[in-house]
Amino acid sequence: MSKHLDSVYLSSRLTLAVASGLLSFFAYPKPGLWPLIFVSVAGLLISVRGATVARAALVGFAGGFAFYASQCWWLSQYLGPLPLVALSCIQALWVGLGLALYALARRHTKTIFGSSILFASLWMAREWASTHIPYGGYPWSRLAMSQSESPLSGWVYFGGFSLLGLVVALLSALVVEWLPSFWAKRSEGLTSRRSFAAPILVLLLAVLVPSLPPIANAKAQLDVAAIQGNANAGLFANTRRGEILENHLDATYELLRNEPSRKLDLIVWPENASDLSPIVDLQARQWISDLVNVDAKAPLAFGTITSNGSDLFNSSFLWEPGIGITDQYDKKRPVPFAEYVPDREFWNQLAPDLIGLIYRDYAFGERDAIYEVNGQKLGVLICFEVAIDEIFYELSDQGATAILSQTNNADFGRTDQAWQQLAIAKLRSIETGLALVNASTVGPSAIYDRGGQLLDKSGAFERDYLVAKIGLTDTKTPAMIFGRYLDYVNLAMLGLAFAWMLWRSILEQRRPRA
């Protein structure tokens, strides 16, 4: 093959990979054209089919960069383009590695299903690695997160985000592997109705299985309100002292005026809803006390910043009528390079201006994430923790009967970030089988009943309140019981498969040649 033709093939692969990666933007919210994720993944697979390991790594890196940068461009809203480029490069390295391993191992697979499950398994392993390494990983942009409005969303009930991602990757790969064989048989006149039997059966199973999850019976109900103060609570917001707290107070009093006869069991404010901590600010303490004890006469969960000695925490409080603060949760997984800087001295040498903008480091919380309201255990998480699998396993283990997700999306403006997060929240409700209250500073906010049923939703950048009765249950889904082991089983199976391939290669090299 001439060098010119060789370069044309490489440029074609790179073009397809980048185009496929960019296409993924439209599959995730806010565009939400979820079928396009299959086209995106299929394109990435086609771009490395038959490529050498080195080329698959290069092409995979290019496609992976486009894949992440196109979806997560909102990262550049408050810290500029450098964090987006750096994050996309790290994620692209994982994509490149995964596709290089696929190119290496595919020569050992002889069947359509074998090649497809290899690709899907490697994609699943790659997602696990990128959501854990480095610094706790980046748990966004998993394939499952594009499927909140898809008929496939129910797969998370059986095995969590990893299983749904595996299904999406497998279906994409099966199409890519099956079509060439089908067209070859068709050109030879060998196709028949039976040629469509297998793909139709696979498609039916993929769609019908996620329609099976039952919705657990509610053992109790909770009348909850989520408050969206439409407060400019961004990292660099130049707001008047106490303005964010006042916004949420105003929205709450609007609810009380409009529905004076409603007996609320719980009011949920977002992350950072009180810019004045009632622990140290007497005015904030009085305002919240009057609201909870006199006007609402209902418990209030709200977010604020707290300190303990030199440690700073992104915290949530539970304030109960006639008692005061009865519980506190400190965010266990602050976001690296946003809420803290790992290895600050090292990174400060590389980008001192950027690192200097993140002037305070939040500590990692160690308190349990359960609030008890009306004798019921409610799981609490803050913002990006909604994307972390282990957070939900822990809440399930602690007996949570519903989930409170308090978030602040003000830093990301009118980008897609908040809609992506809301889609994740819905999938978590399906995955856990629990009701989920997602309260945002600027929206959109939503309340989901058990199994992801939408009860109420707000728009973005408007003051609003949501009210609904949610069902409470302690029934655990298969995802909460078995799903946590799925990634490790997949990693172990891949390890055994590659060990077998290596052993087989060694034997072939030792075999005497005729």
Image (cartoon, grey):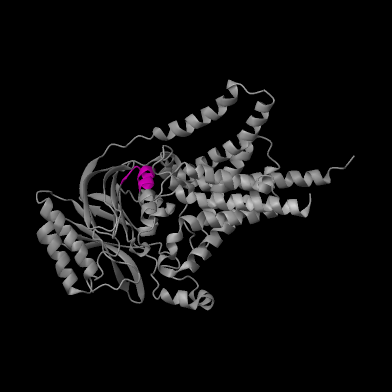
Q: Residue furthest top?
A: 193
Magenta stretch containing residue 429, yes or no? yes
Which quadrant does the C terminus fall into?
A: top right
Q: Residue 150 lies in what quarter of the image?
A: top left
Task: Give the camera-side residue of 172 and 265.
Answer: 172
Span shown in magenta: 426-435
- Who's the residue at 18% across and 63% down the image? 249
- Who's the residue at 68% across and 39% down the image? 109
In the image: residue 486, left or right of residue 412: right
Q: Position of residue 135 (x, y in %)?
A: 49, 64
Q: How many marks?
A: 0
Identify whether 228 is placed above or below 339.
above
Identify whether 110 is placed above or below 401.
above
Q: Residue furthest right?
A: 514
Q: Position of residue 434 (x, y in %)?
A: 32, 44
Q: Position of residue 460 (x, y in %)?
A: 29, 55
In the image: residue 97, left or right of residue 108: left
